[in-house]
Image (tube, rainbow, N blue to C red):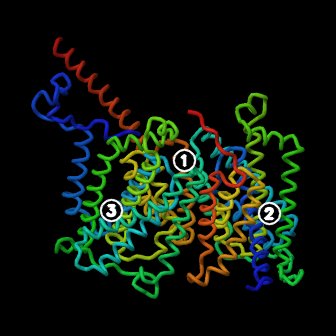
């Protein structure tokens, strides 16, 4: 076995796993604080990338495009919370999940109706040159994406730990009723969470868009993020990162070493099978909270 | 929620006299309103529609409606009655469709009805395998794990040429439908065939959800730990729910391929189809037999209606791309609106509407009667 090739595949997988983590973090934010599995995260990501690309293509400078898209994402996040989730408070989780499925249909349709269905290229100004580190070739773009993801996780961790609203997030995640009782405004916090996940969607959308081109299939990256969530636990940011790394590595290694034996194309499901196998041992994922049930 | 089954006719041979219902005491069993309604519907569907319906009605509306309604019914057993969410229904439809195709291709001697049963059993077996995670997982973890079925099955049918008889495009044409020497390859024939299958399966499911097994499934849904405490075999029940549900969804896949499309291809059973079936169940109403049919009707008719509407309102401006996007948007809005307005689905909505109409009618009737009576006494 060629070990340097193995390392190269492994590192490539780990780095692409970071890209999955980026998407998964958006899910975790919302699941942690409101118990909703937000299927619309992929659609949000598509919308963010498509809006940004269309704005810059119309001659807007980079930062103005970012600012405008950010404003749009904030508005959409708040709008979803206000019009869809608030009326559905106290409904079972499956109902809320279905509602976000509906939201994702609306956003996908609206984004493409608004900006068209053609594929846009997105250039973030990072050359995707292979970098040689210790005999292993690594893509600079992947390294950049990993750095961004790392910065985002660090930022979120600091935010959760040291800011007032971050503390509020944790309080609501811990016990919504108790949070209400000490005078936290659930509505405000949920709006803030949706806004935050809109920001995460923007970051992920830009990186994924630069990688794949901005088009409809961008919203399908949720399907890559779901096994990550299952592996890491729906309510853990650390889990999203570790899960992403595992899924990325497993996917690449399986595709390179097992793929040729069965005719290739297995990356569509191998992550799910790996996640399943793992779940059979730990049903709440790596870092997920084990639910306590009372009869 | 618990509809249909509540007012089943009382058996005429009920043993103790004080337990016999008034109707039975009079010597005849009076059918319940539900049974009457179902009978009437069946009479119209079997007797009247084939005489008056157009080819478009059968090919574009009724046959796909029947297939999707059956798939919804199957998923409803799993999700509505047993409380296990699945996002992989289309995979089991695909298994049913491909199984029936290969059975009719490789064992041409078998009658088609046997093919259908076997295809359902194959789907049930595959469902059992992908239901295994349900023994350990719950809620969203389970829902996501059913996606494994979706992607894996689609991949298998794409990759392994044997299943599609090595057709280079992956799309296979199914043999024309014929049952017991009777050719059913016209629009009406295929519709009648689908209708018969759906009627039989629905009847069986109706009995099932009202049986002790059906109630055990509901107990499992409502509180798994409590169900375990009262001694229900929870693990076996979960697997049973997966098997029965997959069987029915597999049969729905056979109808989809043989009665509706007359071709089979993996892309027809993608994730969007799975979501569509889930929408049918949620919009129609969880744990309601009627719900699957109401939801399927909405899902089938709504895009056609929207296309027609767009064409008349906007004319040439409404190209296929715009249409597709607006269909997506409206479907999404519809789902959200339904969930907010009536989380229990169309079935509950219909109940409420019916109660209101019936209340009005009763009020009107009693008002008329009292006026009539006072006129007579005057």
Q: Residue at x 46, y 58 (%)?
A: B277
Q: Which residue is mark 3?
A: B62
Q: Characterize the local packing of mark 3: few (<14), some (14-19) or many (20 or more) Cα atoms within 10 angstroms.
A: many
- Asked where in the image residue B71 lies, by quadrant, the reply is bottom left
Which residue is at the far top?
Answer: B378
- Residue B297 shows in this picture: no
CA gap between label 1 and label 3 equals 26 Å
Looking at the rendered image, the disc whose residue lies closer to the viewer, 3 or 2, is 2
Describe the element under mark 2 as helix, strand or loop: helix
- Report in which chain the residue with disc 3 lies: B
Q: Residue at x 17, y 71 (%)?
A: B180
Say if labels 1 and 2 share a chain: no
The residue at 87%/84% (across/down) is A135
Where in the figure is residue B113, as x and y percent of width and height? 25, 67
The one of A114 and B20 positioned closer to us in this rendering: B20
Helix, strand or loop for disc 1:
helix
Q: Residues within 10 Å of mark 1 (few under 14, many from 20)?
A: some
Q: Can the viewer see residue A226 in this picture?
A: yes
Which element carries disc 3, helix, strand or loop? Answer: helix
Please state, as top left, top right, bottom left or bottom right, where the N terminus of chain B lies in the image.
top left
| Residue carrying label 2 | A203
**Callout 2 crowding tier (Cα within 10 Å): few <14, some 14–19, many ≥20:** many
Say which chain tag 1 marks: B
Side of A120 where B255 appears, left or right: left
Q: Which mark is residue B337?
A: 1
Q: Is residue B161 above or below residue B357?
A: below
From the viewer's perspective, is residue A137 above or below residue B51?
below
Q: Work out whether B53 lies above or below B83.
A: below
């Amino acid at each position: 076995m060629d070990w340097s090739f193995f390392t190269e595949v492994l590192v490539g997988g780990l780095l692409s796993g970071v890209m999955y983590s980026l998407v998964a973090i958006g899910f975790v934010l919302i699941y942690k604080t409101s118990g909703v599995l937000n299927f619309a995260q992929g659609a949000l990501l598509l919308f963010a990338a498509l809006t940004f690309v269309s704005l810059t293509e119309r001659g807007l400078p980079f930062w103005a495009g970012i600012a405008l898209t950010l404003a749009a994402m904030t508005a959409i996040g708040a709008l979803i919370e206000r019009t869809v989730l608030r009326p559905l408070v106290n409904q079972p989780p499956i109902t809320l999940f279905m509602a976000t499925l509906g939201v994702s249909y609306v956003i996908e349709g609206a984004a493409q109706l608004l900006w068209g269905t053609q594929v846009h290229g997105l250039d973030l100004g990072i050359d995707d040159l292979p970098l040689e580190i210790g005999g292993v070739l690594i893509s600079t773009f992947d390294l950049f994406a990993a750095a961004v993801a790392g910065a985002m996780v660090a930022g979120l961790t600091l935010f959760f730990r040291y800011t007032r609203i971050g503390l509020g997030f944790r309080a609501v995640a811990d016990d919504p009723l108790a949070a209400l009782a000490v005078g936290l405004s659930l509505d405000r916090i949920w709006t803030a969470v949706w806004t935050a996940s809109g920001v995460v969607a923007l970051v992920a959308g830009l990186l994924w868009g630069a990688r794949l081109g901005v088009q409809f299939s961008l919203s399908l990256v949720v399907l890559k993020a779901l096994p990550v969530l299952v592996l890491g636990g729906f309510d853990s940011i650390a889990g999203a990162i570790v899960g992403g790394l595992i899924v990325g590595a497993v996917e690449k290694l399986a595709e390179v070493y097992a793929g040729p034996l069965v005719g290739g194309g297995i990356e569509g499901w191998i992550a799910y099978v790996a996640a399943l196998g793992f779940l059979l041992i730990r049903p709440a994922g790596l870092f997920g909270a084990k639910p306590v049930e009372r009869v | 929620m618990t509809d249909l089954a509540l007012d089943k006719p009382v058996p005429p041979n009920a043993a103790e006299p004080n337990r016999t219902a008034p109707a039975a005491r009079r010597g005849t069993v009076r059918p319940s309103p539900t049974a009457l309604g179902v009978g009437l519907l069946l009479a119209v569907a079997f007797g009247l529609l084939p005489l008056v319906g157009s080819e478009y009605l059968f090919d574009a509306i009724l046959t796909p409606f029947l297939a999707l309604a059956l798939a919804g019914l199957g998923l409803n057993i799993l999700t509505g009655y047993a409380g296990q969410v699945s996002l992989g229904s289309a995979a089991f439809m695909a298994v049913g469709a491909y199984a029936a195709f290969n059975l009719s291709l490789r064992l041409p001697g078998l009658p088609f009805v046997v093919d259908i049963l076997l295809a359902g059993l194959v789907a049930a077996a595959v469902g059992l395998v992908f239901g295994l995670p349900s023994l350990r997982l719950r809620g969203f973890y389970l829902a996501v794990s059913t996606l494994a079925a979706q992607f894996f099955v689609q991949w298998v049918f794409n990759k392994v040429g044997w299943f599609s008889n090595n057709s280079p495009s992956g799309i296979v044409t199914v043999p024309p439908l014929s049952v017991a020497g009777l050719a059913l390859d016209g629009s009406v024939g295929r519709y009648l065939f689908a209708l018969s299958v759906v009627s039989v399966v629905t009847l069986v499911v109706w009995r099932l959800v009202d049986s002790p097994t059906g109630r055990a499934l509901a107990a499992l849904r409502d509180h798994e730990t409590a169900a375990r405490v009262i001694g229900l075999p929870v693990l076996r029940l979960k697997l049973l729910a997966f098997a029965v549900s997959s069987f029915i969804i597999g049969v729905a896949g056979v109808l989809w391929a043989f009665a509706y499309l007359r071709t089979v291809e993996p892309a027809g059973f993608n994730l969007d189809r799975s979501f569509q079936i889930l929408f049918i169940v949620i919009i129609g109403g969880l744990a309601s037999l009627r719900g699957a049919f109401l939801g399927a009707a909405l899902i089938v008719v709504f895009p056609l209606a929207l296309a027609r509407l767009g064409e008349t309102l906007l004319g040439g401006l409404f190209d296929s791309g715009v249409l597709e996007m607006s269909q997506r948007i409206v479907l999404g809005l519809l789902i959200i609106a339904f969930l907010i307005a009536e989380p229990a689905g169309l079935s509950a909505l219909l109940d409420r509407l019916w109660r209101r109409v019936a209340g009005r009618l009763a009020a009107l009737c009693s008002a008329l009667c009292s006026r009539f009576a006072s006129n007579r006494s005057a």
